Amino acid sequence: MPSLGTVGSYPQNPRVQKIRIAAAYVGDTIDEKLVDLTKPRDAEFSAKFPMGKVPVFEGKQGELLFESNAIGYYALLQKDSPLVGTTPLEKAEVLQWLFFTDNEVNTNLSGWLSPLMGYDSYFKPSVDKHIDRFKRAMGCLNNVLLNQTYLVGESVTYADISLTCSLIWAFKLIFDPALRAEFKNVTRYFTTMINKKQFKDVIGDVALCETPMQPPKKEKKETKKPEPVKKAAPKKEAAAADDEEPAKPAPKPKSKLDLLPPSPFVLDEWKRMYSNNDSDVAAKWFWEHFDSEGWSLWRVDYKYNDELTMVFMSNNLIGGFFARLEMARKYAFGSMIVCGTNNNNAISGYFVIRGQEVPFEVYDAADFGSYNFVKIEPSQYDEKKKEIEQYLAWEVEGFADGKIFK
Ligand SMILES: N[C@@H](CCC(=O)N[C@@H](CS)C(=O)NCC(=O)O)C(=O)O
């Protein structure tokens, strides 16, 4: 099959899948080129695609396009495909559903899923608003699809391709059996579409959600010290309703950590040392100055590594966690890394924390519950020293990306 051009994006982006399905319907293919979103776009990319987002398209004749809907549309227009509609009304209806998909489905789905996946902060009123709006859109679709198989006319159009691809993550992560029953026409429609050859060849099998993804867990607020974190492994699915309530604006707590006896290990000095020196020099300084009475060392592992997909998304997850650790900046330093490859990676790291327990400033972070914190006792330092230094230097085997909390 001839290739129409090259789409730049990350693998398995549903926006690219939409383009590839559209191309398949007219007997074309699209080459793919990886764009690493964790790195700034270079000058050439920015000159061609000023928005800086993916997917982007470069055709064989040098045609440049961004916005995924436009790219898939272009593939169909090349072959005068009926998938863009055959009458003026059908053409307008296809557009109608494309706009619906972007504005009512994508926007609200993203407002629901991004905080669940840690790409945005979780703010319950905002997530609830997006859930309501998404369900409103699904209600509309459910009614429309009661008496029709396709969105426009009697066969697949670009509107169906675009909408179906936008619903993939919804059906994987949140459309559990209850939601599937509530929106049964949408579910029937989605499964009909993804089983069509052109869709299946691109998307593969979609495992429908059994247990919907939950908000990042927030440990119960306690006045005394938190559960010993080695044991604390709150069940992933068991987010109690009260955990989901938005925290009332609480008076900012005065940190107990400020009341600890002074320590010769000065965090700011360490951060400067780490930032301005080679890692071997910094590590040497660390072990010479670290005060194991005033500070503690913690191994940190993400609990749900098997759910991670793209490396850059895992790294964003670390970024989200760090953003929620703002209160801990005076009391903690951490190196967290992603090891592995796309669809096979894990998040882990080490933290230096003031005091001998995980303090409020850390365990209050919304997604603290998604990480295992295990204390490294001073008696284990010799055994763990090499590994800790590798995490500081980002020289761990399989290292793909990382972030420093400082
Ligand atoms: N409406 C655009 C949305 C593109 C979009 O949001 N792309 C995301 C990845 S799926 C992106 O590039 N994000 C990186 C950024 O915001 O810089 C389309 O359909 O192409």
Image (cartoon, rainbow, N blue to C red):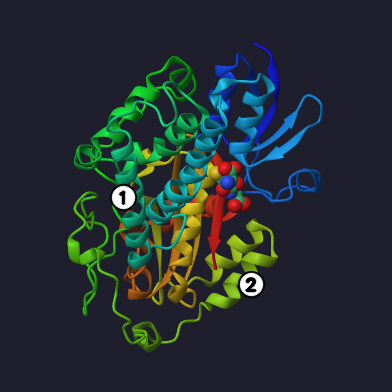
Residue 186, image x and y in percent?
31, 35
Q: Nearer the observer, disc 2 or disc 1?
A: 1
Badge 2 crowding class, 10 Å Cα cut-off, few under 14, some 14 to 19, many 20 or more, is few
Observer-nearest of 98 and 176: 98
- Mark 2 vs 1: CB contact within 8 A: no
The quadrant of the rendering that contains the N terminus is top right
Residue 341 appears in the figure = no
Q: Is residue 102 left or right of residue 6?
A: left
Observer-nearest of 96 and 346: 96
**Label 2, ligand 1: CB separation under 8 Å:** no
Amino acid type, residue under disc 2 in the picture: Arg
Q: Residue furthest front?
A: 88
Amino acid type, residue under disc 1 in the picture: Lys
Is residue 234 positioned above or below 151 on the image?
below
Is residue 59 positioned above or below 41 on the image?
above
Residue 75, image x and y in percent?
64, 25
Badge 1 crowding class, 10 Å Cα cut-off, few under 14, some 14 to 19, many 20 or more, is many
Q: Dot 1 lies on which element?
A: helix
Is residue 398 positioned above or below 112 on the image?
above
Q: Quadrant of residue 166?
A: top left
> Which residue matches tag 1?
135
Q: Earlier in the sequence, mark 2 or mark 1?
A: 1
Observer-nearest of 301 and 20: 20
Q: Residue furthest top?
A: 1
Q: Dot 2 lies on which element?
A: helix
Q: Is residue 363 left or right of residue 231?
A: right
> Which residue matches tag 2?
272
Residue 250, image x and y in percent?
31, 83
